[in-house]
Image: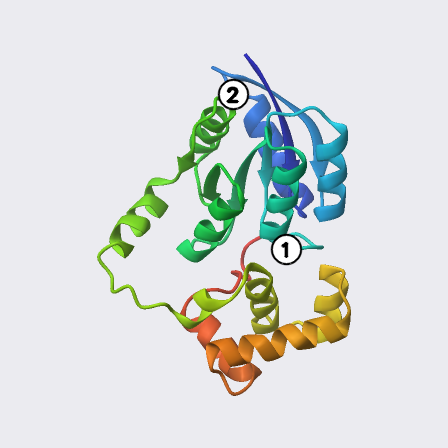
């Protein structure tokens, strides 16, 4: 069986590596029919190319990964989406699955696991790594108290993550394709919902809860 795949990641080396892993698989045939480097090119590819699976990085330039998943599922409900990301915190996985993803892997996964994940979701299944599954299971025994960042909407969460990473209001507005005024409004809501006094408190919170990207990642 031939599985047609679109790869979306803003790092050319990562896209090349993913293509090589899939196209060199022994037991399953994959054809990479397109590569996107940001949300706009990815959406265009999804509309133009026939594919069964989209391998998607959550942290590309442009609109947030969760927003992109929602739009793609609205337009192409049959397309299966495997999130491949550096975010190992379960809150990211929860939001991705709620948006319509069928699988979630971190970039530390082995090549064989990537092949297994794409194969499984292409056939209609759902895939999550053993590590993430264990975190979900452990969370079931934790108190049901909602953490501050879990009160945020998907877009608020994305803006919060970018603020905590040190981006300016203008930079965030440009990357999310909204006005600076809109971002400023989101910032006010975020501080209110999380009951934080200023940006520095958001940064400390994000670091404490490991919500920031690892700077050592490619």
Mark 1 neighbour density, 10 Å: few (under 14) some (14–19) many (20 or more) = some
Name the outermost residue toward the left: 141
- Look at 65% across and 44% down and name the residue there: 71
- Look at 71% across and 31% down and name the residue there: 34
For residue 183, what is the image quadrant? bottom right
- Look at 59% across and 22% down and name the residue there: 23
Please name the residue that numbered disc 2 is placed on.
25
Q: Is residue 213 above or below residue 120?
A: below
Residue 112 location (% of width, % of height)? 44, 29
Residue 150 location (% of width, % of height)? 44, 65
Instruction: Let me know if residue 186 appears in the view.
Output: yes
Mark 2 neighbour density, 10 Å: few (under 14) some (14–19) many (20 or more) = some
Q: Tell me if 25 is positioned left or right of 182 in this view.
A: left
For residue 179, what is the image quadrant? bottom right
- Between the residue at mark 1 and the residue at mark 2, the CA separation in whole angstroms equals 31 Å
Residue 162 location (% of width, % of height)? 61, 67
**Quarter of the image with the N terminus in it:** top right
Name the outermost residue toward the top: 1
Q: Tell me if 62 is positioned left or right of 214 in this view.
A: right
Please name the residue that numbered disc 1 is placed on.
64
- Is label 1 or label 2 in front? 1
Q: Is residue 85 above or below residue 32?
A: below
The answer to whether marks 1 and 2 mark residues whose Cβ atoms lie closer than 8 Å is no
Helix, strand or loop at mark 2: loop
Q: Which tag, 1 or 2, sits closer to the chain's start?
A: 2
Name the one closer to the observer, 13 or 213. Answer: 213
Helix, strand or loop at mark 1: loop
Query: What colour scheme was applied to this rendering of the protein?
Result: rainbow
- Look at 61% across and 80% down and name the residue there: 188
Q: Is residue 64 above or below residue 99?
A: below
Name the one closer to the observer, 110 or 146. Answer: 146
């Amino acid at each position: 069986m031939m599985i047609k795949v679109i790869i979306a990641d803003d790092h050319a080396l990562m896209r090349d590596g993913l293509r090589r892993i899939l196209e060199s698989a022994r037991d399953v045939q994959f054809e990479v029919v397109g590569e996107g480097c940001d949300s706009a090119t990815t959406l265009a590819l999804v509309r133009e190319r026939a594919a069964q699976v989209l391998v998607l990085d959550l942290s590309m330039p442009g609109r947030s990964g969760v927003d992109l998943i929602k739009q793609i599922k609205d337009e192409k409900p049959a397309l299966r989406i495997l999130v491949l990301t550096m975010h190992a915190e379960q809150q990211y996985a929860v939001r991705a699955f709620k948006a319509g993803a069928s699988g979630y892997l971190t970039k530390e996964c082995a090549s064989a696991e990537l092949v297994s994940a794409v194969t499984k979701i292409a056939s209609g299944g759902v895939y999550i790594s053993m590590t993430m599954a264990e975190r979900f299971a452990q969370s079931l025994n934790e108190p049901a108290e909602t953490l501050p960042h879990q009160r945020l909407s998907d877009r608020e969460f994305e803006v919060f993550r970018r603020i905590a990473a040190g981006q300016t209001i203008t930079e965030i507005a440009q990357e999310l394709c909204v006005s600076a005024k809109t971002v400023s409004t989101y910032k006010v809501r975020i501080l209110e919902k999380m009951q934080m006094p200023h940006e520095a408190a958001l940064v400390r919170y994000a670091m404490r809860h490991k919500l920031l990207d690892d700077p050592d990642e490619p």
